[in-house]
Amino acid sequence: TRLKNITLSNGVTSIGDNAFSGCERLTSITIPDSVTSIGDGAFSKCESLKSITILGSATSIGDNAFSGCTRLKNITLSNGVTSIGDGAFYCCSSLTCITIPDGVTSIGNSAFRYCRSLTSITIPDGVTSIGKEAFSGCSSLTSVIIPDSVTSIGHGAFSGCKSLTSITIPDSVTSIGKNAFSGCSGLADKHGFVIIRNVLYGYCGNDPDVTIPNSVTSIGDKAFEQCNKVSDLTLPGTLGAELKRILDKDCKPVIHIDDISSVSSKYRPGCAVGFAEDNRDCTDENGKAYLKYIKANAAKLIGKAIEHPALFHLMLREKLITAKNIDAITEAVQQSGNAEMIAAILDYGNSSISEKDKGKVQQKKDERDANVTNFI
C-alpha cells in the first residue's frame, strides 16, 4: 500500500491478476512494449493513480483491470489492444476521455460503468458488440458514435447517461437490449441526436430524436424508459406494436413508420404527423391506410395539425376534411389565430366541399334538432 512509483522493464511480458491491486499511493505508470497482457484486477483500487500509458504490444485488458481508480484522468491504450474486459474501467469517476484503439472488437460488460466525468467517446470500426451496462451511469457523456460493425447493444448499455444528447445507431445493429437507454433524460436533438438515430437523421438541433434502423429486429423492455424528451422517432414497421413496451409512458413523439396498422391508438396521431412530414406516397397500400385513418379522425387530429402544418396541409390537399367536420375544424383553426391557416380552411370550406354535401349535413343537423324538440 506504500508503493508510489514503479518502473517495469522491457523484459516483462505480462502483468498478473491483481498484481498491483490496492496500491493506494501509486500515482502513475508506463507499461512497456514487451507487455502483451494486463491481468484481471491488475491495478484495481489504485486510488491515487492519475495517468497510465500502455505502449506497443498489449492486446488485452483484463476484467476490472483499472476498476476503482477514482483519480485516473488520462489513459493511453496501445494500438494492439483488441479487447477491453468486463468492468475494466468501472468506477473510474475522474476519467474524462479515452481513445479506444481501432483493433478493439469487443467492449465488456460494465467496462466504463460509472465513469461520471467521461464526456465523449468514439467507438472504432471493428467493435461488434457493446456489453451489458458498458457505459451505464456515465452521467456526463454527451455523445456517442457507434460504428457500422456493431450488431448488438447490451442491456442497460447507456442507462443513466442523463447528459446524452447525441447517439448514432447504424443499420448494422440488430438488437438493442432491455433498458439500453433508460434514464437518458437529456436525449434531445431532432437535428443532432441519435437515441437513436443514425446519420439517417443527421442532427443539429435541440429537439430529441431517435432513429431505429430497419435492421433492428428486437428491442428490450423499456429500452427508452424515462427518455420522455424524445420528440421524434423513426423505426421499422415491424416494431410498431412494440411502442408501448419500449417507450416511456409519458412519451408521445412524432413517429416515422411505414405501417400504421399495428400501432396502438395512443401513438397513431404522432404517426399521422410523421407520415405528413415525410411527404410519403399516398397511393400505395400503406399510404391509403394512413389517409383512411386521418380522414376518419380529422376532427380529433386538428390540434396536431395546427401544431404541425405538414399534417394540416395534407388534410387539405387530399380532401380529408368532410362536410360534417368542417365547422368544428374551422372553429379550432380560427381559435389558433394563424392567419394563413384560417384563410386556407375558409377557402377549403368554400371550394372543396360541395353544396350537396353541405346540404346533407345541414339536413341531418335539422332533423336531430327537430327530434330533440319533439322529444322535449
Image (cartoon, grey):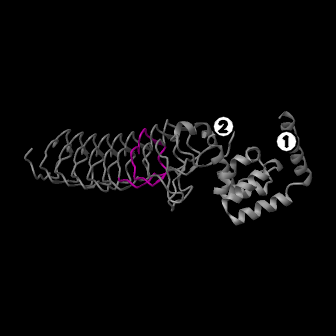
Picture disc at residue 157: none
Q: Residue at x 50, y 57 (%)?
A: 189
Per the image, label 2 sits on a secondary structure element best described as loop
Q: Residue at x 85, y 44 (%)?
A: 365
Disc 2 vs disc 1: which is toward the camera? 1
Question: Which residue is nearer to you in this view: 278 or 352?
Answer: 352
Q: Is residue 232 left or right of residue 61?
A: right
Picture disc at residue 369: 1
Q: Is 17 situated above or below 348?
A: above
Q: Which residues are magenta?
A: 140-168
Question: Which residue is nearer to you in this view: 19 or 64?
Answer: 64
Q: Residue at x 40, y 55 (%)?
A: 142
In 3D space, how far apart are the residues under numbered discs 2 and 1 (Cα atoms)? 39 Å
Picture disc at residue 262: 2
Q: Amino acid at mark 2?
A: Ser
Rendered location of residue 326, percent (x, y): 79, 52
> For the N terminus, which image quadrant?
top left
Q: Amino acid at mark 1?
A: Asp
The disc, 2 or 1, on the residue closer to the chain's N-terminal end is: 2
